[in-house]
Image (cartoon, rainbow, N blue to C red):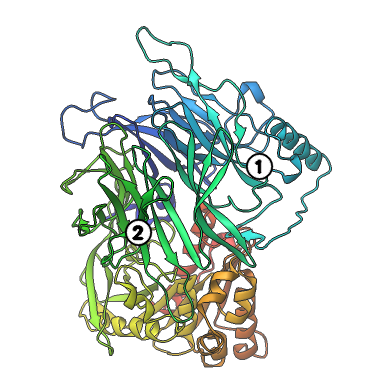
Amino acid sequence: MSTPFSDLDQYIALPRVDGIAIDPDGTRVALTVSTLDDDRTGYRRSIWQVPATPTGDSGGTGDTAGRPVRLTRSAKGEGGIAFTRTGDLLFVSARPDAGAAELETAQLWVLPSTGGEARPLTRLAGGVGGVLATAAAADVVALTADLLPGAGTDAATVLDADAELRKARTDKKVRAILHETYPVRYWDHDLGPDQTHVLTLELVPGPVTAAGSTPDAVAPEQPVDRTPAPGRSLDHVSGALTPDGSVLLAAVGVREARGDRSTLVTIDLSSGDRTVLFDDVDVDHELPALSHDGRTIAWVRTVRSTPAGANQQEVWVAGIDGSDARRVATDWDRWTSELVFEHGDGALLAVADQDGRAPVFRIPLDGGAVEQLTHDEWAYSNLRVAEATGVVVALRASWAAPMHPVRIASDGTVATLATPAPLPDVPAHLEEVETTVADGARVRGWLVVPDGDGPHPLLLWIHGGPLNSWNQWSWRWNPMLAAARGYAVLLPDPALSTGYGLDFVNRGWNAWGQAPYTDLMAITDAVEARPDVDETRTAAMGGSFGGYMANWVAGHTDRFRAIVTHASLWALDQFNGTTDSSQYWSSIFDADGIAANDPHRFVADISSPMLVIHGDKDYRVPIGEGLRLWSELAEHHAAPDGSMPHRFLYFPDENHWVLSPQHATVWYETVFAFLGQHVLDEDWQRPELLG
């Protein structure tokens, strides 16, 4: 069967749904969709509208045929979508604005529900980060924006002062950053010189655009800074507004020696007064959610991990003032990635990894047992609840299909919605595989089995994290591309994986090279025993923690013909001090754990050819890891003339993931050429664009 996965040019051009919002009355769904730009070197988002009525049902809204309708077009693209209480659509874009054509930064825009053209609501010199929250019963929006600390703390002058300082830095071509606290970087970007603030904008009715229609909202003045001198406390802020827009519930950081802890606060938006609700040393309070009536909060409380093990992620609720705090779902051994209040506020809806999926759960606030709502093969994300009607929509995906919008009924029934990104045909099917290991643990995974009888060469793909699960589609690590070339791909969840309970995570804690490694080898043994798998033609691959495991595998077995290690941890003592978040990494290992599980100590034992891949803008696993790995491979394995069976694919301007489409293409071309040489006994073919 011919599919887009047989051709990398077709693959990178597939449209991708990556965001969702629902209007207050639950009739219209907005989606952000990324498509390849004209020069094929980047993706641009546009906003589409689809009815909230499932495909095939009558009574759809919007387009009479229920088809997706494109709402925006611009060379810069749009994102960060949210609806106001009147149904106007807010979004963030750097598209040109005739009123401030010299600004090229992202601003907040509004697309009226009554029709007409989008228009900007802000003109900030440093741009807008995104919509933090909108009020359900007031014309107030909270947004994030980065302001220079030298602009001061006076709300009346800070925005103008920030603009002047930015112009001075630009005129003098100054890019230097002076830091006063740790950290200085995050994933793939520098922190500073500006700091994230929370601003609010009051929207007022604009002119009526049609007879009898509801006036859409406009912004009469600049937004107001509600968080003067925040330092780095709002770098990862999340939160919600009370229905009247008077109070912001937020998770904010409190500085520590090498990072911060997450705390819950409320901010009175009229006075700027901040009330700390929950702040405990060695505890993080995250994922704040606010009930529809504004009286109850919910969040995830987690005691910090230590080398002794990880701790449970607990779901808590309390009054908006912090009163009557109590834990719910006390017997639920899962880690929540999303929390929202259902309509009526009697329960929470949550998403959590479970057994290679990510179902939706219902958590009663009265202490009742957690109920699993969805019972299928999918992983759900981006839960959205319509304010007035309680309609629930989400995105879902699996290894058989990328993210697409769905509607979830109160009984757990799931129906698909229209999408502007049709699901592509795939060249393989999924099978669930598992084995029982020496300590009695069940280790499971997905096997992507290509079309045809086989026996197929096998690729072992090891996930990153390590607190993660191979449970849904990835555009960057996509096994369907390998399946189109005849490979079976094993996607296992070894010790440290989420979705199997805390004990399963802690089997590999402070011992990454122990149970995670033996779990991987055991499930590989089980799959290699299948008649449709060729045990003589195998390779192992991994990125981030998966790259660490690929390095560990390379130093501990010669069973694989080739090993691909991407963005990998190589020398743990070096990594812990150079990563962007050393506080966390240094807290989960003790000295003995680092020494016993450091892969670079086994470099002399490596016999499988390795393809090392690293991006210079990777700050989570800095380039020094890849450089040291390459240097030590040469030290121990290079011939007198310097030649090696190994390769090093280096991206000077890519990050942890290698995201630009042209570089993703080069990544796959190099990986498949390397695997073809060593697994399929093909001649080495250097990718054309690598010279």
Q: Is residue 354 above or below residue 659?
A: below
| Quadrant of res 24 | top left
Q: Indicate the secondary structure of the residue bearing disc 1.
A: loop
- The amino acid type of the residue labelled 2 equals Val
Identify which residue, 516 or 387, lies in the foreground: 387
For label 2, the residue is 315
Estimate the x, y position of residue 634 in percent, counting from the top left.
63, 85
Category of crowding for the residue at label 2, using alpha-carbon neighbours closer than 10 angstroms: few (below 14), some (14–19), many (at least 20)? many
Estimate the x, y position of residue 653 in percent, counting from the top left.
63, 58
Estimate the x, y position of residue 366 in percent, counting from the top left.
24, 53
Q: Indicate the secondary structure of the residue bearing disc 2.
A: strand
Side of 1 where 261 appears, left or right: right
Side of 627 where 534 appears, left or right: left
Q: Which residue lies at the image location 39% right of the left edge and 88% below the top edge?
A: 559
Q: Residue furthest top?
A: 211
Estimate the x, y position of residue 316 in percent, counting from the top left.
36, 57
Identify which residue, 463 or 650, lies in the foreground: 463
Q: Which residue lies at the image location 38% right of the left edge and 24% below the top edge?
A: 86
Side of 64 where 153 appears, left or right: right
Quadrant where the C terminus lies?
Answer: bottom right
| Quadrant of res 358 | bottom left
The numbered mark, 1 or 2, whose residue comes first in the sequence reads: 1
Category of crowding for the residue at label 1, using alpha-carbon neighbours closer than 10 angstroms: few (below 14), some (14–19), many (at least 20)? some
For label 1, the residue is 228
Q: Which residue lies at the image location 49% right of the left edge and 15% below the top edge?
A: 206
